Each structure stands twice: as structure tokens, then as C-alpha cells.
Image: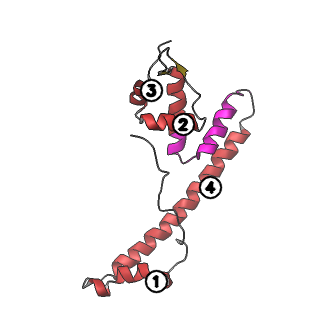
Amino acid sequence: MDMMTIGKLASATGVKVTTIRYYESTDLLPEPDRSESGQRLYDQNAVERLAFILHARDLGFSVETVRELISLQVEPDRDCAVVDQIARRQLGEVRRRLTQLEALEAELKRMVSACEGGRIGTCSVLASLGDHETCLADDHAGAEVLASPPSLKA
């Protein structure tokens, strides 16, 4: 089996070396074998595991949930109801964030449409940002601004 260094693994998967080390430190990637000189060596299984992690993270799954999904993979004959439950929970979270983002969009549209130009001292957008009471809806209070989770990709 061809082994590759961490740099080659990073190139093969499109992620930074620091991302690979991070996933090792969180036990999502197993500790790799090392060469006699101490260099990390990875096989095709590491490429596949890293691709799985990246795809799951892109879909918004937390590191802890990805760890749970990986642990379930070692039991291929087990009923997949628990995996379905995890995916449904994530779908619910995405829907919740979409609702928050729609509220943010509506409020920002309202703020922008209220802008009549002029001077900074009388700017309706800045006034709205300074006084939450002027907002039409409270739905966006504390909303997560990101539609997708931050990524550690290159």
C-alpha cells in the first residue's frame, strides 16, 4: 500500500496540514504511522476518512457528531436508525438556521429600504443598528450569522 506524507495528504484532499493535525488532535483521524525519521505516513484509508470528515463538516455536523458517526461505522451490521436520527437532527438545525437567516434578511432589507442617503449623523441604518427596539422582529436576536459552519479548508 502506498504511503504518503502529511503534505501529500493535504494536497490530495485540498486541506491544510494544520487541519489534518487538528483532526488528529480531536481523534477524528487516527494517529498515523511514522517513518524511521518520525515523519507522519498516511494510507488510502486516511484519505477516505478525511474526505468523510470534510463532507460531514461541510454539511454542518459538529466535530462531536462526526466522531459519533465514525464510531458507528465500525458496526456495519447495526441498524442505521441512530444515523438517521443524527441526520434528522442536523436537518432540523439547518432549518432553524434558515429561519434565522430569513429573519435577518427581512430586517436588513427593511433597514436598507429605509435609508434615504444623507449624512452619517442621520443614517437610518446606523440608527437601527444602535437601537434594537427599532427592529420589526425579534427573530434575529442572537442569530448565527453564518449559513454554513466555518471550514478549515485551504
Mark sitting on residue 92: 4
Residue 4 on the magenta span: no
Please determine whether, in this image, residue 24 is positioned above or below residue 36: below
- Could you tell which of marks 3 and 1 lies nearer the N-terminus? 3
Amino acid under disc 4? Gly
Q: Tell me the distance, in whole angstroms, between the alpha carbons under discs 3 and 4.
A: 36 Å
- Could you tell which of marks 4 and 1 lies nearer the N-terminus? 4
Q: In the image, 108: left or right of 84?
A: left
Q: Look at the numbered disc 1 and give the secondary structure of its residue.
A: loop
Q: Which residue is mark 3?
A: 6
Q: Tell me the distance, in whole angstroms, between the alpha carbons under discs 4 and 1.
A: 31 Å
CB-based contact (under 8 Å), mark 3 and mark 4: no
Residue 99, quarter of the rendered image: bottom right
Mark sitting on residue 23: 2
- Could you tell which of marks 3 and 4 lies nearer the N-terminus? 3
Residue 84 in the image, given as x and y percentages of width and height: 68, 42
Q: Tell me the distance, in whole angstroms, between the alpha carbons under discs 2 and 3.
A: 12 Å
- Could you tell which of marks 1 and 2 lies nearer the N-terminus? 2
Amino acid under disc 3? Ile
Amino acid under disc 1? Asp
CB-based contact (under 8 Å), mark 4 and mark 1: no
Q: Which residue is mark 1?
A: 131
